[in-house]
Image (spheres, rainbow, N blue to C red):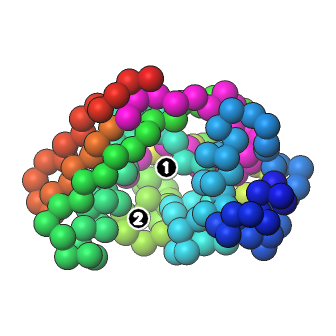
Amino acid sequence: MELEGWTNDRLVLERVSRLPREQWIFGEKNASIVLASFLHASPTGMRFNNGELGAWYAAYELRTAIAEVAHHLRREAILSRRDEMRLQYREYLSGHRGDFIDVCGHQAHHPELYDPADYEASQVFGEKVRATGKGGILYDSVRHKGGINLAAYIPKDILDVTTGSHFEIIVPLTGRIIARTLRTE
């Protein structure tokens, strides 16, 4: 990991040091994909992580994953004043182990965790969960009714990552999302 950081300006030692050394993974198939989700976090964070250290976000169903991705693409289209966003994505399939906090079905009791636009409270909650050493959080999708997502905090607990299908997701400013399969592995 350190050698990669010396030759890859995207992986600086400061970022790598945010992740405890015992959680680093290397030498396994798609390890760099897993680590990228932790080391290249959005500066503003995501639902259950702040901008300091990312997490592995996954959905139990492909439709849920597409809805989550499309929501963020639409936000990007609006911010960049584009009529649509059109990007290609690779599906990754994985297993998970660990002790997850399950907040599914708790929207009425904890609406702050499910705010569709403001992640401040959910990020504070998520970072408290991470600090306890828990594996992550299971939660209901805000973008796909009935969908379930997870945010995993420990890279070594993300197992058997394989490549699935390749998709193009087209998100107009208004109207339906289009997701089409380009190639299946």
Q: Residue at x 61, y 46 (%)?
A: 33
Q: Does 184 appear in magenta?
A: no
Lateral position of residue 102 relative to residue 127, left or right: left
Look at the numbered disc 2 and give the secondary structure of its residue.
loop
**Image quadrant occupied by the N terminus:** bottom right
Q: Quadrant of residue 168?
A: top left
Measured along the vertical axis of the image, is residue 164 above or below residue 87? Answer: above
User: How many numbered discs?
Assistant: 2
Give how far across and how far down residue 64 sits, in percent: 37, 39
Q: Is residue 38 visible?
A: yes
Residue at 37 percent of width and 50 percent of height: 68
Whole-percent x and y of residue 98? Answer: 75, 37
Other residues around mark 2 within 10 Å, as few (<14) / some (14–19) / many (≥20): some
Q: What residue is drawn where x is 52% and y is 42%?
A: 58
Q: Which residues are magenta?
A: 141-166
Q: CA distance from mark 1 to mark 2?
A: 12 Å
* Three-letter amino acid code at the position of disc 1: His
Asked if residue 18 can be seen in this view, the reply is no
Q: Residues within 10 Å of mark 1 (few under 14, many from 20)?
A: few
Q: Which residue is mark 1?
A: 106
Residue annotated with mark 2: 115
Q: Let me know if residue 161 is in the magenta part.
A: yes
Q: Is residue 71 left or right of residue 16?
A: left
Quadrant into which the C terminus falls: top left
Q: Nearer the viewer, residue 147 or 25?
A: 25
* Percent of width and height locating residue 175: 10, 53
Residue in view at x 29 percent, y 32 percent? 182
Compared to residue 16, the image places residue 181 above or below, namely: above
Instruction: Residue at the far top: name it.
Output: 185
Nearest the viewer among 120 and 155 is 155
Residue at the extreme left of the image, as rendered: 175
* Amino acid type indicated by mark 2: Asp
